Image: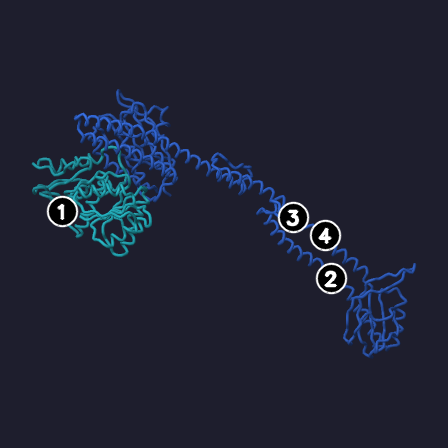
Amino acid sequence: MRILIVEDDLEAAAVMVRGLTESGHDCASAPDGVAGLDQARAGEFDVMIVDRMMPRMDGVTLVETLRREGDQTPVLFLSALGEINDRVDGLKAGGDDYLVKPYAFAELSARVEALARRRETGSVQTLLRVGDLEMDLIGRTVHRQGQEIDLQPREFQLLEFMMRHAGQAVTRTMLLEKVWEYHFDPQTNVIDVHISRLRSKIDKGFDRPMLQTVRGAGYRLDA
Amino acid sequence: MRLPRIFRTTPFRLTLLFLALFAASASAFLAYIYVATAGEATRRVDQLITREMRTLQSAYGRAGADALNQALIERAASERPYLYLLMRPDGTRISGSIEESPLDEFNGDPAWTSFRVTEFDVQGREINRPARGLQERLSGGEILFVGADVAEDEAYVVKIVRALWGAGALVIVLGLAGGVVVSRNVSRSMTGLNTVVDAVRNGDLTARAPVRGTRDELDELAVGLNEMLDRLERSMAGHKHAGDAIAHDLRSPLTRLRARLEASYLDLEAGRGDPEAAFAQAIEDTDGVLKTFGAVLAIARLQAAGTAPDPTLFDPADLAADICELYEPLCEDNGLDFKAERVRGLSIRANREFMAQALANLMDNAIKYTPQGGAIMLRVRRRSSGEVEFSVTDTGPGVPEADRSRVVERFVRLENSRNQPGAGLGLSLVVAVAEAHGGRVELSEGPGKVGEIGPGLRVAVIVPQAA
């Protein structure tokens, strides 16, 4: 996957490049908005990571410009501004996700993967399948090995999100944001409890567990 | 040359402007008085002269020039106040009480003139008296002049004009004096405000403007300024407190982190220890520090903003339902009995995200501090005051009454909760959220002490109901 990192903090950019390269991605970086715009126009990228506040051109202007030019590459905004308004502004400008600094690398990596995946599955799906697990999005039913699994509405949403990002690590924050639509950090392990409920429903009685815990990151649904 | 300060003040300038307007209207007023009095006197004299002229003309018409001449001589001898002059068509004098016409040119049309007559009094002194006259050509070609002494009228007019000038001068003097007095007063108040602004600009946030209790706009301005400064001072103090608190609260986990890293380093050097575990621990510690930092920042921003951004209208019961759904499994896992009571149909205008976070913090706290076998109740109701109340009640150890006001402060953690995770910011954020929505937080005792359980804690977030 080709990733463009537009970040004026060169050390932070270097850490991102190194980490993402080790995860098998092909990275390019630009130290400011103008250089970032040039690179974005020149190369085909799968995901862009854009800092909001940069010299010469800020991230929001950069993304607005690209979107006007018809470039739909998924963008993850990085920002030291964490207020709700800032997030809304960033998403309005054409950003696809928003990560507040400081962040854990695992969080960044998981979100980048999720953004790239979203692009691949552009068409509207009515059936999700991961290994022997099947989800019918219209009938709102879930089967594993042909056996129906009864889920609460929120558990269904949670599993849907996990299935759409199967094989990727998803963090607790991502789950809270995308499934519950809250952007704060609960002090207790409230998400873990929901995951363990879901796990007991989809994995109990089957020989191979699908819902894995990823240390230091979150969870992953494997086929 | 610089004008004295009083002349440069806005009130004084406004006074001058009003004075100019006032003087203009006073002039119009005085002009009217002049026309109505002095003008009237002149018109009266003119009427008398005209009447006399007609009388003489009719005498002339009846009996000719000689009869008129006779009449003039008789009239001049009598005590009538008129001046007469009868002239031949070429302008030479026939008879009359004056020697020559005061008119230099006469083309035959009736002509008015104002002139002076010279008389000698009994002591032989020359007296100049103002007079007015009308000259007309008679049907036979002779010229008749009839005049009248207007000295008395003139004196009357002069008096009126003098009085009017005096009145005008008085208007200006009184207006100016009033302006000075008014602007002095206003200036004094403004100076008080300016002094405060100067002091604040120079960094003294404790300066306050004097409030005179007159309840006028300037007083309102002073009160407003003082309130603004109060808030600014509180906010600054809050920021300073937050800074101190961050320094204090981040120092200990950072110190711990450093010590652990150092120990791991020594272990690794000695060929002992598990580097992976050391790193995992270090990252976990760092995350803790970052979490604390994020919470402090969120509180500081809310307090600095004063109001919550992006308020939307929603049913508090829906929000509570969401929170219940999020926390119910956790309660169950912790062996807690969780119940919710939600009155539907209320509505509040609030930032949903912040309100959710506040409720989540209350739930987090309740779960953290309530021992297994206890119970937690989330309630949404309408108070008799009309406000909307969210409350979370637990059966944990509660907070002694004396400590209740203290636990909502930042970083305050009671002695027996030190071993629990958290930075002591949860309730502070709840308070900040409530205040940003024009509400408040109340702490009270839970259901009471039953054996080993209780007495519990009830935390209520009270916000106004949307109109």
Residue B386 visible: no
Q: Secondary structure at mark 4?
A: helix
Q: Tell me if residue B421 comes above or below residue B232 in the rendering.
A: above
Tag 2 residue: B39
What type is the residue that disc 1 sits on? Leu
Q: Chain of mark 4?
A: B
The C terminus of chain A: image quadrant? top left
Q: Please, what secondary structure does the residue beneath circle 2 have?
A: helix
Q: Position of residue B50 (x, y in %)?
A: 79, 69
Distance from Cα at disc 4 to Cα at disc 1: 102 Å
Q: Viewed as shown, does residue B43 lie left or right of B325?
A: right
The answer to whether marks 3 and 1 mark residues whose Cβ atoms lie closer than 8 Å is no
Amino acid type, label 3: Leu
Which structural element holds mark 1?
Answer: strand
| Residue designated by label 1 | A128
Check disc 4 and give the amino acid type: Gly
Splitting the image into 4 quarters, where does residue A210 fall?
Answer: top left
